[in-house]
Amino acid sequence: MKDKLKIKYPENILSLISDYSRQTRQSFKRHIFLPCLLVLFFVGTPFSAFSQNTAPTNTIIIKGQVRLPSGVNMPADALDVVLLKFVLSTEGQVTPAGPQGRVKTNPEGKYEFVGVSPDLRAGFQLGTRVETKLYSSKIFFMRDGETLIETDIIIPGISTAVENLETNQISMVVETGLAQITVTEVLLINNSSPDRIDSRSKPLQQKLPIGLKNFRMLETNSGTKIQHTLVDNFLKIENIFQPGNTQIIFQYNLPVWFGSLEINRKFNHSLDKVRVLTPEGVLQIESNQLISSAKQNLHETVFVTWNGKASDSTQLNFKISNVTASSLQYSGVAAVLLILLFSAVALFYRQRLLQQKQIEDPAS
């Protein structure tokens, strides 16, 4: 039975994440913004390109301050600040030029890079790690004749204003298994405030379909782990959301009987933010709340995208059919039919015997 399963993981999941991140990657190309590369600079790599001595006349000084929010103290051993450099390749791709330097802050969080070689065609960024999280400055560029650049790394504060969290989009990737479907959901949550938002005291809730099995929370490409609890079919998300977008990816199975299943999914927003993806030619969808739009190639698999219609309803209902059925289900039906048949035959002969007995012994 297991040989019939053709679910492809994690490729399809990673493809969906990549689809959601396309706009972010385009922004990287426009602004040369790659903060995730900060990880490269906290593994003890030696830096010898910079010196704290007097800089040559054709170099630039870069200085600033790590500005911590109220209630967060500077660590006793200060903070590491790294200088990142990014250039565009001949193909127009953003290319990291490697670590350009690392310095320690003073007790007030101030830092200074001395002797930085100017590059007018590159983008630069400063980054540090606070409480295990990576933070970065805005992208900046050098100008001809410039000798001093001042830029700060601002660490956002933290609040519990979960009302500032908005769901931008939800994607449901539905794939077939043996007598079940696998649903992978990707939530794109936007924090429009300048602060980190802590939802642990007031979790975000998602009402998932009844009867789900094998739920698991998946990590994003950045390795972010989302804290959560699941009670019956209610998912509570307890996370600290950074400013900007956060992806939440989870997966579960739904049992299917005789090849079809009706899915009911409750959302906290309009259905026009929902889309459903199914492999082309494998599964069929029936719903008056979904519109088939485009097709997407995700790692050699063609998916059909169904977009939700804008409406006052927040309840999405759709039927999935053409799911691979298990022979055990049909065997079970056959067994039930045989039992019913034998029961009917036994009841028939019992009635005949009773009637025959009454004819032979009218007095009884």
Image (cartoon, rainbow, N blue to C red):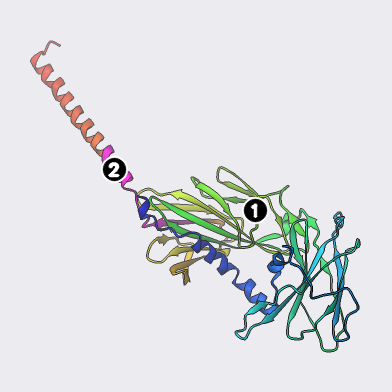
> Circle 2 — which element?
helix
Residue 319 on the magenta segment: yes
x and y percentages locating residue 270 in the rendered image? 59, 61
Decide which of 34, 95 is in the foreground and name it: 95
User: What is the spatial separation of the Cα atoms under label 1 and label 2, in whole angstroms?
Assistant: 42 Å
Q: Which mark is residue 226?
A: 1
From which residue to which does the magenta span run?
316-336
Residue at the far left: name it: 360
Tell me if I can see residue 309 in this picture: no
> Circle 1 — which element?
loop
Left or right: where 349 falls relative to 144 = left
Disc 1 packing (10 Å; few <14; some 14–19; many ≥20): many
Residue at the far bottom: name it: 144
x and y percentages locating residue 33 in the rendered image? 70, 74
- The kind of residue on which mark 2 rests is Ser
Q: Residue at x 54, y 58 (%)?
A: 185
Look at the image and tell me in which quarter the C terminus lies.
Answer: top left
- Between disc 1 and disc 2, whose residue precedes? 1
Residue on which disc 2 sits:
331
Disc 2 packing (10 Å; few <14; some 14–19; many ≥20): few
